[in-house]
Image (spheres, helix red, strand yellow):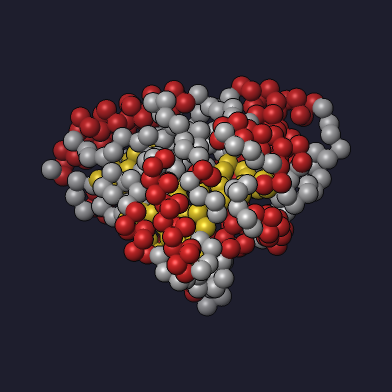
């Protein structure tokens, strides 16, 4: 066989959407599978885009420093300092081709073959692939029924091979936001286990949705919870520009080996083929730190969907952030998702996120699409119960 057996197996295991499209009988499709926002970027982004286009800069389309433009990293650091009430410097920040590149650079930097990374289920579907990319092994710790952190489940997974734990808050797929107290508990546990096993254990915080928070909620500062922490973040969600592939990684200024980690991530940025974040987009986003889409638009869509699903009898935790709803299936997961697909409604199975018996809805779509789909969700529940 020409294609790698390992890759072929992973491709077959993850090919949900193709299978669901084959089951559609309806003429109209309501695709809630992808976190690909249909909300326009904020006006500040559009204005800045025009400004950069109309004021040519000699570096605009050239290779950037692997770590990113100095002025961009300084802007990111200043914003993180303001928001986190602590001092972050440009030397702690590396610009990347989105949070995906940031995570892959982090894993490339940290992992030796066979070392383990703990995932909190439900987890972002791509994490096991990223970890495997760099020779690591995924270990799963279940969260509580309300998707909050279960510290005992994490402790049970830590052993001499543990190199890191990755948390995602706000969480994809559940919309959960981990509390400050739970992060402090994780930090205390990792300190104890690092001493016990005489090795550094790292906390990787995927904060791709750090600004997509509802009901006035604020995201706790993970750097205050644990010294050996690294944040990966992206402008894809906050500015509604996922196709532009720009983000960053930042090490905790309190990390004693932070300079070594930054040097290694910069090298990883090169040898993984990213060669840094896009130069044009770095110029665009430099003054836009903290700028975000209108969260009310997402919150209105959340409430529209959640109010209707609750009325129809679905069981779920209303998300505190992101643009996903993670609901229990009223019957067998595969059967339920197939019934939805027959009416043109596409959702993702929870088993792909490490929690079977559930499905994920991405509500970052036009409001009218949600409204037109609701009869199908109602029909599915009535058909199966």
Q: Residue furthest left?
A: 385
Front one among 230 and 214? 230
Q: Is residue 98 left or right of residue 55?
A: left
Report the residue at 47% width, 69% height from top. 197
**Horizontal and vertical percent position of residue 219:** 46, 36
194 lies left or right of 358: right
Of residue 238 and residue 343, the one placed in the foreground of this image is 238
Q: Residue at x 50, y 50 (%)?
A: 226
Place of residue 51 in the rendered image (x, y in percent of width and height, measured from the top left): 75, 25
Q: Quadrant of residue 60?
A: top right
Image quarter where the C terminus lies is top left
Point 62% across, 43% down: residue: 247
- Residue ID at (40%, 65%): 158
- Left or right, 382 with reference to 100: left
What residue occupies the far bottom of the structure in this picture? 1
**Image quadrant where residue 71 sits:** top right
Image coordinates of residue 278 in percent, x first then y, are: 71, 44
Q: Nearer the viewer, residue 239 or 136?
A: 136
Q: Quadrant of residue 148?
A: top left
- Can I make out residue 353 in this image? no
**In x, y percent, where is residue 378?**
22, 34
Residue nearest the observer in this picture, 97 or 329 = 97
Q: Is residue 216 visible in this depiction of the protein?
A: yes
Decide: is 167 above or below 37.
below
């Amino acid at each position: 066989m020409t294609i790698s057996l390992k890759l072929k197996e992973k491709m077959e295991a993850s090919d949900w959407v193709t299978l669901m499209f084959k089951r559609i009988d309806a003429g109209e499709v309501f695709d809630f599978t992808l976190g690909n926002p249909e909300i326009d970027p904020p006006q500040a982004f559009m204005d800045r885009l025009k400004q950069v286009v109309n004021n040519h800069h000699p570096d605009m389309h050239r290779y950037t420093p692997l770590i990113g433009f100095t002025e961009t990293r300084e802007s990111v650091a200043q914003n993180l300092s303001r928001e986190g009430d602590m001092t972050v410097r440009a030397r702690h920040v590396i610009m990347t081709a989105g949070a995906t590149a940031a995570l892959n650079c982090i894993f490339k930097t940290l992992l030796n073959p066979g070392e383990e990374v703990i995932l909190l289920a439900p987890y972002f579907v791509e994490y096991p692939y990223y970890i495997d990319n760099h020779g690591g092994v995924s270990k799963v710790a279940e969260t509580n029924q309300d998707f909050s952190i279960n510290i005992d489940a994490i402790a049970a997974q830590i052993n001499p091979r543990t190199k890191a734990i990755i948390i995602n808050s706000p969480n994809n797929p559940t919309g959960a936001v981990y509390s400050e107290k739970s992060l402090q508990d994780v930090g205390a546990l990792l300190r104890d286990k690092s001493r016990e096993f005489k090795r550094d254990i790292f906390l990787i915080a995927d904060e791709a949705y750090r600004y997509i928070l509802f009901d006035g909620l604020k995201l706790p500062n993970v750097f205050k919870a644990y010294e050996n922490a690294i944040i990966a973040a992206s402008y894809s969600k906050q500015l509604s520009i996922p196709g532009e592939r720009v983000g960053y990684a930042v090490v905790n200024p309190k990390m004693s080996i932070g300079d070594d980690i930054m040097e290694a991530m910069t090298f990883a940025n090169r040898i993984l083929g990213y060669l840094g974040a896009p130069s044009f987009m770095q110029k665009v986003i430099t003054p836009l730190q903290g700028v975000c889409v209108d969260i009310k638009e997402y919150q209105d869509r959340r409430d529209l969907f959640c109010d209707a699903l609750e009325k129809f009898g679905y069981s779920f935790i209303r998300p505190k952030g992101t643009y996903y709803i993670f609901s229990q299936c009223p019957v067998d997961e595969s059967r339920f998702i197939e019934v939805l697909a027959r009416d043109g409604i596409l959702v993702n199975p929870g088993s792909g996120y490490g929690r079977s018996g559930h499905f994920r809805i991405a509500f970052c779509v036009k409001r009218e699409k949600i409204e037109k789909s609701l009869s199908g969700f109602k029909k599915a529940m009535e058909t199966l119960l």
